[in-house]
Amino acid sequence: MLPLHSHRSHGHWRPSSPSFPSFLLLLLLVFLVRAPHPAFADLLDTTVYQALDLAPCTRLLNASGVIGCQNFGASGVLYAIDTSDDLASFVAGTQKDSYVAVVPMAMLTTSTIQTLRNTGKLSAIVVTPGTLLPSSSSPFTPLATSGFEWNPNGTSLSFQSFDIPIYAAWPTSNASQVNIDAINEAVAYNRDKGYNGYPMYSADFDGLMYAQRDSDTCLRRGTCDPVGSVSIWSSHSRLITPSDTKPILLVAAALDAASFFHDLATGLDTHVAGLVAVMAVAEAMARSPTSPTTFAKHILYTTFAAEAWSRAGSERFARDLRTFTCVKDKDAACPLVNQACGRPCVANTEFRNVSWGNIESILELSQILGPLYPTSPPSNLTFYTHSSSATSSLASRLAAASADALVRIVPAQGSNGLPPSSSGAFARNGVPAVVVVEHSGAFTNSYYNSELDGYPYTTFNASLYTPTVCSVASSTAKTLWRLAQNLDANATLPTGWDVNCTVVRDWLDCFVRNFSCPLVTGIPFSVSGATHVSHYSGVWNYYNPNPIAYVVSNWLTSTLAHTKGPAGGCNASSPCSANGNPSGTSCIYNQCVAATVKYHYAYGTGLEYDFDKGYFTVVDPAQGTWTESRWYSTRFRIFMATSRTIQGVEVAVGLALTLASGAGMWWTRRWVNEKMKQA
Amino acid sequence: MGKFEKGPAEDILSVCKKFFFGGFLFLPILWLINFVYMYPIIRARNDLSHDVRKYAFLSLAGAVLWLLILITWGIIFETQRDVWGVRGDMLSVVIPKGR
């Protein structure tokens, strides 16, 4: 190495001060150790990590505590636990690392999780569908009433709290199969090495749930939001007034379902079948040769949201019908631009016209899918009506209407009362209720509120279920048509009039397999490019209903329209406000329409917005108080990890290099300064 | 030793007293400083008033008492702040997320 003064002697440059060379060295060092360029950081990140799109288990809270998963940052080597032998081997193993257990859905039980946790080696769990589905899997509660378990397969897994991340690699679309393949490949690589030959595939998880303790605490701290969405109520009648003497028939279904992993909620039997049947009834009734607006009774189609969460939708709707009081017409604290009432803050109050005393009965279509996974459409099924009263004319009318149908609907025997359902909020307050279901006693659906209720979505064949659901819808429509006109149970029906089974099939397909179907894409601003959307209610807010509520309300508006412009009279660039279309209409399926279709806020009746405090509070811990935690990110990545020993050596070498650099710097600087002084 | 440490015994007593009484203004750090500073002087000099020793050790006792109180409070606060609800939140400068 040439001394610097030799350069100077050759006239290359002349330092302005004796310390200039050391300044240059310092600059070089700063350049070497400064943060890498963002593009370089991205490159490094994608080179080291492979991010996969997995469904996280997230945290919910109520008045008394937390459920779901918490994640304070976890990572570990992927380890396959496919069988009980694998589990035993993992427990007995002497490995010292942290591990991420990759388990099939059939193994996701409380006892498996507990056993894994007790080893002290588990940092997280990744769930895959596995090759063999469990014969039963309902993470919901057993739903016991008076000692009778309606959901005997209920494990309450969804209502337990875990302090580790649990994510699911799930085929929600054909494209998402890559996530499962990546996990399987990575874990197979580790297994081939006997989980002992580093480097091995590891995973790390983001997903800190901000909320803590209980709903009251997290709402106050602004770290959670009420679980909920919007219920929808609709009618053929343009105007319903408290003073009209028409009795009201409610037809109900649940608008959403639940599952352990919220992103994977589908509820094919839990709610989709009933919802689609109610939609099909509305569509058929709208085609009645005798206009439903002339019927002696109003028919109200009600689809209730967040029903898995303390029946938030039906409880709030029933309570508002009975007791809603507008304290203040306009309130600055109400963020709505158009306030129908400022306090409580609501966008519409037309529900107040639905007089509680005028409600004659409620008919709910609940679990009406029939057997899951049939090889061909079933024939000669018998479904059951559960009534709030021992003798129900509605139930006997349904039995008469369905006598010759594919699905016979007969009164259930036994004395267990109404199954857990949306009707409960009405029956409890004196409204006669009838719930139509496939089970006479306990649920026959062993996947109630589970990810498996409708799985696998990508190969879902709606035609297998259409005849069953359509048959129930048909019997329901015929019963309502007669009842709403005060006609005899065997009165002659209009020739050729019935439920359109194509509507049933198309909506089943849209809801489970392909949310980008024409029925959805014809609605402006709906989700685009989605195949499977979650049927979990989500969190409540003033403006945005979840995708399911949005498309159902728009489709009902189009179907029940009392005001219509010409077909093709509008599109995305030509709204209803132009081209002389009727005022107050919305452009749906390229037609300007208006109908009596209203949203109704759905969140737990134990929660209310406190206008003085400026946030929601728990007002009644005994009622629904479910909230969902906020979080920043639920990222999942896999990467190659070296052994702990190598990692330790890497840190030691890094430290040694840093110290050596410092010493080198110090020595060089001293040397340069000395040389400068000599010069 | 510096100039002060070698100075008149009255000056040392005066400073020691000021620090001791100043500590009562919820300033236990003054007591701690008083003891740490005075103790070597007390050991090094025999001509100091006995009061210097008294104030220095009382300062130490006060500082230890404060330390115990602060540790107790810290434990109580960390374990109970969630239970106290709104009051706990009001006493918190930063509320850790998720805990």
Image: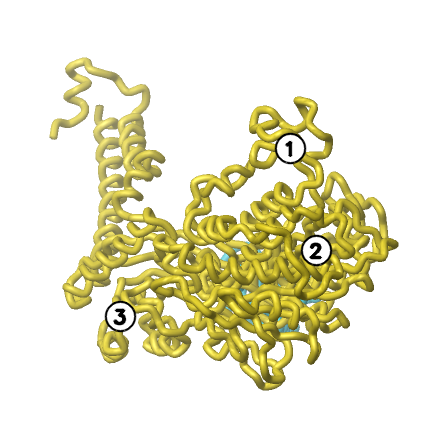
* Residue identifier under label 1: A592
In this rendering, would A643 be left or right of A277?
left
* Residue identifier under label 2: A300
How far is disc 1 from disc 2 in space, using C-alphas? 22 Å
Does the CB distance between marks 2 and 3 fall below 8 Å? no
Q: Residue at x 36, y 62 (%)?
A: A376
Chain letter of the residue carrying label 1? A
Residue A43, how many percent across, how many down?
29, 38
How far is disc 2 from disc 3 in space, using C-alphas? 49 Å
- The chain that appears yellow in the image is A
Image quadrant in which the C terminus of chain A is located: top left
Q: Amino acid at mark 2?
A: Leu
Q: Amino acid at mark 3?
A: Asp
Task: Check the image and name the residue furthest to the left.
Answer: A1
Image quadrant in which the N terminus of chain A is located: top left
Specify the colour of chain B: cyan
